[in-house]
Amino acid sequence: MNDKTNEPTVTAGYKRDWRTGWIVFAGLMLLTLVEYFAGTLPNPSAVLLIILGLIKAALIVYFFMHVYRLWREEKHG
Amino acid sequence: MSASAIEEHHSGQQHGVELSPEQQVKANRFGLWLFFISEIFLFAALLVARFFLWGDTRPELNQVVGLIATTILLVSSFFVYRGETAIEHGDNKRFMNNFLWAAIFGSLFFVGVVVLEWNVFGLSGEIAGVEIFGHLKPTDGVFGGVFYAMTGIHALHVLSGIFLLLVAWYNGRKNRFSADDNWGVEGIALYWHYVDVVWVFFYPALYLIGRAV
């Protein structure tokens, strides 16, 4: 709890988490671009845009907000 | 109940229930998520107002500004994720750098909405033949009212999020977080991502869904 470690410790888990961040960010950007082009069509599909929004929200909630930690008994950090 | 069990029971009542650090963090997370759920009612009400009052139409808004604002917010969320990941692995320097970048991008989003979309300074100008400053006013009927209500409530959350990011950054400077003790960072990161999730739904509702009139 009181271990104030400031030295960078580049472990395999650290690298994996960074890679996950990049992949999720790339996915979010791709979906945003798809949304943009779908939305600028003459008759944009509201259903498609809502589905794309739901996928983006799910990515953020799962990977960035770690919602699964709510049910997991774990050591913090 | 044996005498020792009764004694233990009364002792527990006297001193309350002590949570382990892990249990406390879990309780904190649960409390914060309950707060997020309560806020869903606010944002959902705004979305319902939008779909009820605008229907299959929307005001003519600058699509490029909407796309750039969304991208900036996603980038800031990405930096927050990196910062949180860094402190969870004991890397305070990277945590601070990433949170500072997140605050900068969050500020860019806020300034972009206020200066470009709300056009509080009444500016006008074009880039490649496209007007970059907004023309919608809060008094422009249901279009103006709903647009300013949605972007205003969201901008307020962005502003408070920027403040919290800077508080975390300041505490990082004081070495107050570590790999094992970083709930402050996690809580603020959760809040920032939540603000991002709200925009994920607001962006298509405001800019993309419906015919521009």
Image: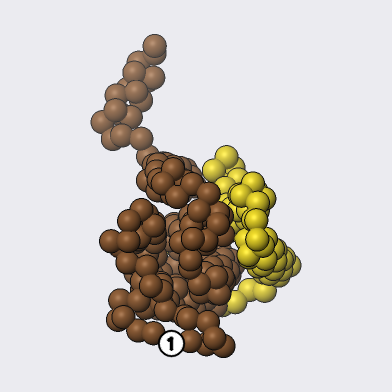
Chain colours: A yellow, B brown
**Disc 1 residue type?**
Gly
Q: Looking at the rendering, which quadrant does residue B82 occupy?
A: bottom right
Using the image, name the chain to which the residue with label 1 belongs: B
Neighbour tally class for label 1: few under 14, some 14-19, many 20 plus, Cα within 10 Å: few
In this rendering, the answer to whether B42 lies above or below B193 is above
State the image coordinates of residue B179 (x, y, percent, origin top left).
53, 64
Residue at x-position 36% and y-position 35%: B17
State the image coordinates of residue A5 (x, y, percent, origin top left).
52, 71
Q: Report the front residue among B155 and A74.
A: B155
Residue at x-position 59% and y-position 56%: A60
State the image coordinates of residue B59 (x, y, percent, origin top left).
46, 61
Q: Looking at the rendering, which quadrant does residue B1 occupy?
A: top left
Residue at x-position 48% and y-position 76%: B105
Q: Looking at the rendering, which quadrant does residue A40 occupy?
A: bottom right
State the image coordinates of residue B14 (x, y, percent, origin top left).
26, 31
In this rendering, position of residue B166 left or right of residue A32: left
Inspect this view and state whether residue B182 appears: no
In this rendering, position of residue B158 left or right of residue B200: left
Residue at the front extreme of this rendering:
B213
What secondary structure is found at the residue carrying circle 1? loop
Q: Report the front residue among A51 and B92.
A: A51
**Residue occupied by mark 1:** B125
Inspect this view and state whether residue B124 appears: yes
In this rendering, the answer to whether A36 lies above or below B134 is above
